[in-house]
Image (cartoon, rainbow, N blue to C red):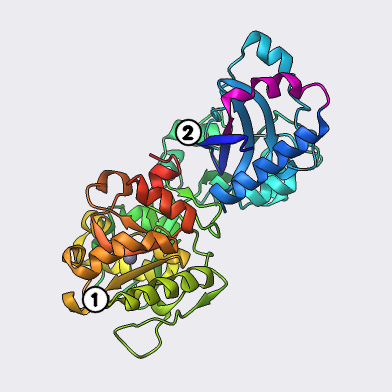
Amino acid sequence: MDLIVTHKLIKEQEGYTVILYLDNQLTEFATEFNKKPENKKIDLNTSVRNYIKEKLPGLKINTVNIMIGSILIASIPLASLGKTDLNQHQNIKEKLQTNVIQSQINTNTPNIYTVKYGDTLYKIAKKFNTSIYDLKTINDLDSDIIYTGQHLTIPAQYDIYSVEPGDTLFEIAAVYNVSVEKLKSINKLNRNIIYVGQNLYVPKLLYYRYTVKTGDTLYIIAKQFDVTIEQIKTINKLSGNIIYKGQTLRIPDFDKDTIVINPVSRLALVNKNNRLTENYAPDNLVVPNIPFPYKEYYPKKLMREDAAYALEQLFNKAEEDGIDLYATSGYRSYSYQEYIFTSKVMERGINIANQTSAKPGESEHQTGLAMDVTSPSVNFRLTQSFGETKEGKWLKANAHKYGFIIRYPVNKEHITGYNYEPWHIRYVGKDVAKYIAENDITLEEYLGEF
Ligand SMILES: [Zn+2]
């Protein structure tokens, strides 16, 4: 019997809460649930595990809530599935009698994390890409002991700025693009007085690295990136206005992007709001055995092994059907995207660059799961007219059978943030690809991100 009929995803600060809906006719099951049906619990555990494995592979899941209709019958941290007694926190009879509908929506304020059952400082530090030391320091913890429900400030959001002669709170706030009030509250300051050498928490700055070219000045760079000269000077610790060719500058990027916590997942969502860190590179990149329009090796021929294998199957089928497909561009590193993006900014300004190119970390090509595909009929170009060709149509009709989706469909610009790209395919696995294709949705919609 299939216990689970459908699911819903709720995005949390990182990862998801999954809500699984059991068949409504299982009310009897629910009533019995709290007695002692050991084997039913095991059944449910197995069903939950199988369901997640099949329908939501690779998704970062924190908690699974199991519902019948509007009644929550169990809430389990995923890590404990299979080990823990499912109903240890839930009294099902009580739920049935009072018909309590529990809202599971995460109401945490940003930067604050509420400790969950089973958390340790180690796990939290790992989750937020910070250290136990930093967690303890910023939260004034004397020991490693934390308790469920405790609120912790997550220090990964802050850098430390050491006050220099002449600095004022007003200037520091301007550089980091926050209000003086916010800066004071982060640092628990009551007054506006700061002293030289004082360490202040400041919002963690995202930045681009840009290598200075002949003819560049601080004025031109600041103008093109739409930041102030003071901001560039402060984060690069420059005392004068002189820069030199070949110098690497950090340029602040005040975007409030979310960092992708599960970059390895086949369903990792990378877009204009969710970025990969500069440290992320897939560790199993290979060159798929498919046609490219060029013979030489380039890193852009690379793809993740699982995706490369699936792409080979797709291309084999294309050949069988007499369809002439070529792959042009797969993996792209953070630093290469950074180079492309900053070059474009210096050419056209930040706004145009933003519309036509992905920022470093925001390109799906960094996952190793994406490939740009083209054909001789459009002279191997990446152009929207590819969608009108025999090859483009074949790709749209068949990609999902091999686990790929057309990532930026026509008329979905407001959801994906990208214009129609009939050439850009993304590996998500067969089940999810089929679901997305059949329902004519995007990855954002599938993940409940829109
Ligand atoms: Zn692409």
Label 2 residue SS: helix
Q: Nearer the viewer, residue 201 or 42?
A: 42
Left-right relation of 133 to 364 = right
Left-right relation of 115 to 276 = right
Disc 2 residue: CB within 8 Å of ligand 1: no
Residue that badge 2 annotates: 182
Q: Residue at x 30, y 65 (%)?
A: 395
Q: Nearer the viewer, residue 51 or 267?
A: 51
Where does residue 446 sit, x and y in percent of width and height? 42, 44
Compared to 200, does 399 lie above or below? below
> Is 35 colored magenta in this rendering?
yes
- Of callouts 1 and 2, the N-terminal one: 2
Task: Please identify the quadrant where the C terminus is shown.
Answer: top left
**Disc 2 marks which amino acid?**
Lys
Q: Do we see residue 210 in this rendering?
A: no
Q: Nearer the viewer, mark 1 or mark 2?
A: 1
Label 1 residue SS: loop
Classify 10 Å Cα crowding around label 2: few (below 14), some (14-19), many (20 and above).
few
Compared to 386, does 82 lie above or below? above
The magenta stretch is 20-36
Q: Residue at x 73, y 42 (%)?
A: 81
Where does residue 265 sit, x and y in percent of width and height? 54, 57
Q: Nearer the viewer, residue 12 or 438?
A: 438
Q: Quadrant of residue 327?
A: bottom left
Where does residue 57 sit, x and y in percent of width and height? 56, 52
Residue that badge 1 annotates: 375
Task: Please identify the quadrant where the N terminus is shown.
Answer: top right
